[in-house]
Amino acid sequence: MTNPIHSSQNINAAAYSTPQVIQTKFGDINGDGFFETIFLMGIKQPDSPLWHNLTLVIFYGQTQQMEQIPLKQSLGYNPTIFLGDFTGNHIEDIMAISDTGGSGGIINGEIFSSVSNRVRSIFDAETFSDKLKYTVNYVDNYKAVVQSKSPAKRYTIDLQYKGADYLAEIYNKDGTLKQPIEGWVDPISGLYPVDYNRDGVYEILAYQAIAGRYHADGLGYVENILTWNGHEFIVERQTVGIFGEDLS
């Protein structure tokens, strides 16, 4: 006779190891004139919003064939997919995003494009973040300087909005630093498709948080607009957004 408890445990274990459809999109991703069905699939962590084994499953409308493509970062929270033309070839690409769940709000992001009838990854946030080098240094007169290596840019942030107590911990009364302080810029914490030129081709708005003495000591965000140059995504425009002083 089957032990009902043991049988129930087996059923639950099977449910936790079976891939589920998280999201479904429809679009022509290879330019053959037929819609493909794109499934984002994964396995749900028991008693948690965490998904693992994140995979794209593509059902091709013309050939009726299936293809599975594991995501590079196959573990994440709140995974989603978006279809849009990022490369300017009038064919829809696939953007997959998930949250890492860390305190810095870092995300996993990857873009897939059909090249010579083969879907391949053309962008991932982790690799791109590694290319973006920054320094963050507090300087005299209540300022912090953020410097980007590529593109070569320097941004000066006035810290006086932080308030007298904050400044007194860092600066002498004459505005000189009590000691050197270095901050940092986080990896990418937001990727947003935006068609700035309204031409049907999406650019990517990428956010990176700027931290001061510690992670919660936010100084603002580096905002990079990324465009496809025919071979890879590059930074077309870079700005820094700062937090305003609370006047309420």
Image (tube, rainbow, N blue to C red):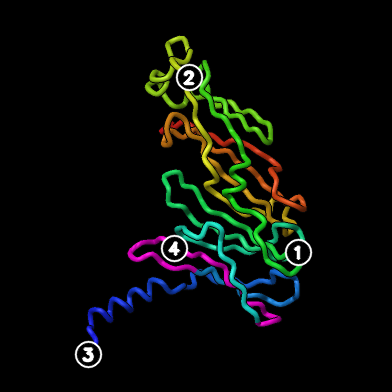
Counting from the top left corner in percent of width and height, residue 126 is at: 57, 48
Closest to the camera, between mark 3 and mark 2, is: 3
Residue 23 to residue 236: above or below: below
Q: Secondary structure at mark 1?
A: loop
Residue under pointer 1: 90
Q: Residues within 10 Å of mark 2 (few under 14, many from 20)?
A: few
Precedes in sequence: disc 4 or disc 3: 3
Whether residue 60 is in magenta: the answer is yes
Q: Which mark is residue 180?
A: 2
Closest to the camera, between mark 4 and mark 3, is: 3
Res 13 → quadrant? bottom left
Q: Which mark is residue 51?
A: 4
In the image, 145: left or right of 198? left
- What residue do we see at 49% from left, 26% from top? 182
Res 171 → quadrant? top left
Precedes in sequence: disc 1 or disc 3: 3
Q: Which mark is residue 1?
A: 3
Q: CA distance from mark 2 to mark 4?
A: 42 Å
- What residue do we see at 52% from left, 47% from top? 189
- Quadrant of the rendering where the N terminus is positioned: bottom left
Q: CA distance from mark 4 to mark 3?
A: 36 Å
Closest to the camera, between mark 4 and mark 1, is: 4
Amino acid under label 1?
Answer: His
Amino acid under label 2?
Answer: Pro
Precedes in sequence: disc 3 or disc 2: 3
Highlighted magenta segment, given as a residue range = 42-64
Q: Secondary structure at mark 4?
A: strand
Instruction: Tell which residue pokes out farthest to the top in this image.
Output: 174
Residue 125 to residue 238: above or below: below
Q: CA distance from mark 3 to mark 2?
A: 73 Å
Residue 61 to residue 87: above or below: below
Q: CA distance from mark 4 to mark 1?
A: 32 Å
